[in-house]
Image (tube, grey):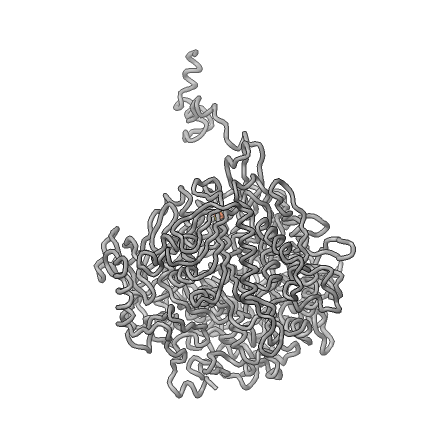
Amino acid sequence: MAEAHPVGFQWVMEAKRRGAKVFHVDPRFTRTSAVADAYLPIRAGTDIALLGGVVRYILDNELDFREYVVAYTNAATIVSEEFSDTEDGDGFFSGFDPETGTYVQDSWQYEGHEGSSGSGHTAQERDSAAGLTHESHGAQVGGQTRRDETLQHPRCVYQILKRHFARYTPEMVERVCGISQEKFLELARAWTENSGRDRTGMLVYSVGWTQHSVGVQYIRTGAIIQLLLGNMGRPGGGVMALRGHASIQGSTDIPTLFNLLPGYLPMPHHAEHPTLDEWVDSIRHPGQKGFWGNARSFAASLLKAYWGDAATPENDFCYGYLPRMTGDHGTYQQVLNMIDGKIKGYFLLGQNPAVGSAHGRAQRLGMANLDWLVVRDLFMIESATFWQNGPEVATGEIVPEECRTEVFFLPAASHVEKEGTFTQTQRLLQWREKAVEPPGDARSELWFFYHLGRKLREKLADSPLPRDRALLDLTWDYPTHGPQAEPSAEAVLREINGYDVTTGRPLSGFAEARADGSTAIGCWIYTGVYADGVNQAARRKSRHEQDWVAAEWGWAWPANRRILYNRASADPDGNPWSERKRYVWWDAEKSEWTGYDVPDFEKTKPPSYRPAPGASGTEGIAGDDPFVMQGDGKGWLYAPSGVLDGPLPTHYEPVESPVRNPLYGQQANPTRKMYAHPVNSVNPSPPQEHGQVFPYVFTVSRLTEHHTAGAMSRTVSPLAELQPEMFVEVSPDLAAEVGLTHLGWAHLVSGRAVIEAKVLVTDRLTPLRVDGRIIHQVWLPYHFGFEGLVTGDSANDLFGISLDPNVLIQESKVGTCDVRPGRRPTGPALLDLVADYQRRAGITPGQHAPAVTTDDEGKEHGAS
Amino acid sequence: MGVRSWFEGWPVYRQLTGTDPLGRGAAAKSDGSRALTARTDTADSVARSVCPYCAVGCGQRVFVKDGQVSQIEGDPDSPISRGRLCPKGSASKSLVTSPLRQTTVRYRRPYSTQWEGLELDTALDMIADRILAAREQTWEDVDTQGRPLNRTLGISSLGGATLDNEENYLIKKLFTAMGALQIENQARI
Ligand code: SF4
């Protein structure tokens, strides 16, 4: 955090000054480790084993915050007797279908709801990264459940959790992660001692955590610990995701993503959602509790914002206009389709996949096989010049005279040359004022897309074709100003906020959304950001003039709420758990919820409220159900649906690992998304042979002085000067083993690529003892490429393409490689070297090893 | 210059007698530095902004002189950053004023070995034509069972995490209306 989010880290130091203990877990010793109370070097890709160890420690010693756990989580809920655990299936839960490599989730359901998993078969959910829709809400689950609040029932979630993690002992943590038992126990002790009525602990991760084939389950494990310890919805608690780009949160909320529409509404699927009713019901799950009961209003209001007068109740608000998904349309599938010649044109908007995405060679070969490419950026980036300066030009794989891609480079406006909002990592929207005009041809994306849309509509004005209706009926009349006819960002923000269609009055909250076409809302979770016609995101009341919650600085979704699920900061009766951790509470006198933050609860629903049997939607939520977006109002220790690779996290080895999974016969995540494409390959891991060809583990991350693919830092002289060269960090032991010299050169080889780097011999890297042998890890920054003031080979070129099944994010934080002294070969000799490694490792590009690695007996247990 | 003012001009004297015993502030000031004014004092205007790099969202004040960015500093009012910026945030002025920034449209023809110039409006027009052609060539009305698809898989897009919410909103809205489904950004990476 001190490296990649330095200014945010001041608050960790502030907490430390007040007595907090800081534990840092990382494969590499960093600036964060330097000031932490304890540093735990970990083998990359084993976090579930470590955190699972903490879960076991909590349960074994009964250190959970029992009152919180019983009232606010699903610990007491009884699960179907058809469910069987990975402990009985050698790494498989019940319901695995080896044919598709996915689970049927019926047996994971709560008792009595076996038929209602709604998932049926999850292969399609995997292709559409359906897990992402749960960023703002839980998955489907029956509202009425059977519970045993003594937590003794053998099939209650609490007992299932206990059995599932029973083997995650301190010895096992040491064996899997390479972390000593002593260090592990220090962490487990501190975490549990610092949680409860009077104290809260926080888990902070950077989003490298998501770049694993089990990324979602990493975060699930963290959430289980924080729920067991009563750290959710309370000040100083929670699971804090540190995201890496100024508005990456915003670009998920208002998604430039294939599977989502604004506000986490799913993009429709051709077979599942042919009609508006089917689409809406798949979101609101009739009969379920919680706020998603209003999904029809959110959906109708979005369509109304898109298609205005053309969208009427009679024509289902133009639902028919929405494009439909049929499968996996993610960025990696797209790149493979580019290589196969299926894609005509590609837009790159402030993104540089030639350096920043996994398998850089595949990215560049894909771009070299387009009809046209539009790059909009501040600088001439690698993704615009691959046809001229890319590594494939040097190897002869791309010949400029033979490369047909037509490239348009359009200069973009910088953050000071346009106005608009970023949503930072805590869901806080902050409006930026424009300082100066953009230079020359540089324009904002707002300008580019508004005028592109205008042109398209002009060209199609007389089109009789049904497919052009969606463009022609689109509301696209934003006011413009200035010499360049810049569209008004405020007008767009107002549409995002939503308004009353008849009066034009901006809405003040999403409760005002209507399903009858009388409201139009661009992104319902942002409703309120323009309440009373005031740009709330532009509020800048000084921190000196308000309390520590700082509710008048910017605006946080939803409803300017700073801590989600903050009803949990009070006990079931509505009183603060303690004076010290007072945050939101029930004011009995006024009969309303009050506190320092906007309460995350219906304002006047008393703690004693109990729903009538069979009540659904918000009425189904009891006065002591804080998790109001969940289908049962509870925090989920156990996820009966919504997570495709299991209701509980399980340690699987990374897709490329030198170690046989010490816990189960199943080696790696059996549900991961794999691509058998000639350009793609996976280095062999046990139980496959030839793993020793790639004996070392490599991991990548950021430097303070650079930013992701380097477009905004390798081009900026002060930053380029501070970190001028690509390098690899190796331990003194590994340097001796391989024959590397400090400040000399090394090259690293995987089944995809070979890259070179300067050597930094340092004890920031610790050789780890894992399962009885020494594992060496090396570390690389992933910022370098061949353009800019400072250049170097790209670390991401080493990775292949394997994805997490829930969100289709690639495993690009851990892989295996060989490390050799000296510089890499150049030209065709480089390709020969990679081919030689592939041959020695038994890799046949385009084929991958079977996902299931258990013996037959294991399969019988788990894989039904 | 009188003896007294000569004496008072001596930094050690000021260090020993003044309010700056460590000699790191007022005591060490020379006549030259005393005459300097901060760029922030002479700015024509100040815009309240946010750092464009990571998602911490540090507050920035952007100072403008004669239509050019003259300085970017941390915003001391921000409850997130309390006036601080890390090396990247501090380099924002160098970012927006970098001589490497492209300010004209560049165009590479198929099979060409070099860039050439192009008018912005011509570029926009050519891109619009290519979008319409890609839709024409790859449009899918319905699936094999006659259910609606309304889409093209011939167009892709990547990017958004560095852009404004308003921009992402228009991008998604326009692409969705043109049937382009394959829209992605860094959040998938
Ligand atoms: S100043 Fe540094 S920590 Fe703050 S937002 Fe910018 S990059 Fe992030």
Residue beneath the point at 65% across and 52% down: A492
Could you say which quadrant of the image residue A400 lies in? bottom left
Residue beneath the point at 72% across and 56% down: A499
Task: For residue A733, say whether it is visible.
Answer: no
Pick whichever, A67 or A102, lies toward us.
Answer: A102
Could you say which quadrant of the image residue A799 lies in? bottom left
Among all residues in the image, which is located at the extreme right? A502
Pick whichever, A831 or A67, lies toward us.
Answer: A831
Q: Where is residue A348 in the image (x, y as percent from the top left)?
A: 49, 56
Residue beneath the point at 75% across and 57% down: A500
**A356 in relation to A157, above or below:** above
Could you say which quadrant of the image residue A336 lies in? bottom left
Task: For residue B169, say whether it is visible.
Answer: yes
Q: How many callouts does the rendering have? A: 0
Which quadrant, please, contains the N terminus of chain A?
A: bottom left
Left or right of A663, for residue A824: left
Pick whichever, A95 or A352, lies toward us.
Answer: A352
Left or right of A475, for residue B178: left
Q: Position of residue A821 (x, y in %)?
A: 23, 58
Q: Position of residue A749 (x, y in %)?
A: 30, 63
Pick whichever, A633 or B137, lies toward us.
Answer: B137
